[in-house]
Image (tube, helix red, strand yellow):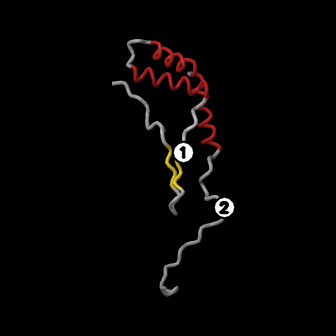
């Protein structure tokens, strides 16, 4: 074992939550105002998705994505299975079927 005098001194972490990690009042107000703006366009967004689903000229990938969004908002997101490997000493969780991004029209 190494000599304790040779090891560098590590600064001690303080107790409790680190400073600056909580959202301040200005950030909360900005977030709330942005949410209000988005809520005002809610009906237009739903109409857009509905039109995409019903438009036979829209690519099927985009129609399916719009239908998924509508169903997720109407009925909630489906439960996603989580695989847990508990045979090793490392605790690893792998979430499957999580969308990695939206569809982009080309």
Q: Residue at x 52, y 78 (%)?
A: 9
Q: Is residue 30 above or below residue 53?
A: below
Choose the circle earlier in sequence order: 1 or 2: 2
Q: Give left or right: position of 93 versus 36.
A: left
Q: Which residue is mark 1?
A: 82
Q: How many other residues sit within 10 Å of disc 1, few (<14), some (14-19) or many (≥20)?
A: few
Rounded to the nearest whole Å, what is the CA distance between mark 1 and mark 2? 31 Å
Q: Could you tell me which residue is drawn at 37 percent across and 24 percent down?
A: 105
Quarter of the image with the C terminus in it: top left
* Residue 42 at x, y percent in the picture: 57, 22
Question: Percent from the top left, x then y, of residue 64?
Answer: 45, 23
Q: Residue furthest front?
A: 87
Q: Secondary structure at mark 1?
A: strand
Give the total number of marks visible in the rendering: 2
Q: Compared with residue 25, is residue 14 higher up or lower down, i.e. above or below?
A: below
Q: Nearer the viewer, residue 36 or 85?
A: 85
Front residue of 33 and 7: 7
Between residue 81 and residue 60, name the one nearer to us: 81
| Residue at image coords 64%, 58% | 17
Please tell me which residue is depicted at 52% across the width and 51% down the height of the picture.
93
Q: Position of residue 84 (x, y in %)?
A: 53, 51
Is 63 situated above or below 97?
above
Q: Secondary structure at mark 2?
A: loop
Can you tell which mark lies on residue 38? none
Q: Residues within 10 Å of mark 2 (few under 14, many from 20)?
A: few
* Viewer-nearest of discs 1 and 2: 1
Mark 2 sits on what residue? 16
- In this orientation, which residue lies closer to the viewer: 93 or 58? 93
Does 27 sit left or right of 98 as displayed?
right
Residue 68: x and y in percent read 51, 25
> Relative to residue 12, is residue 58 drawn left or right?
left
């Amino acid at each position: 074992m190494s000599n304790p005098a040779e090891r560098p001194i590590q600064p001690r972490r303080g107790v409790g939550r680190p400073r600056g990690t909580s959202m301040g009042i200005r950030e909360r107000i900005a977030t709330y105002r942005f949410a209000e703006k988005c809520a005002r366009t809610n009906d237009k967004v739903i109409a857009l998705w509905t039109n995409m689903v019903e438009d036979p000229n829209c690519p099927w990938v985009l129609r399916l994505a719009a239908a998924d969004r509508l169903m997720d908002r109407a009925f909630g997101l489906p439960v996603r299975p989580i695989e847990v490997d508990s045979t090793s000493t490392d605790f690893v969780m792998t979430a499957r079927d999580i969308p990695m991004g939206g569809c982009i029209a080309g």
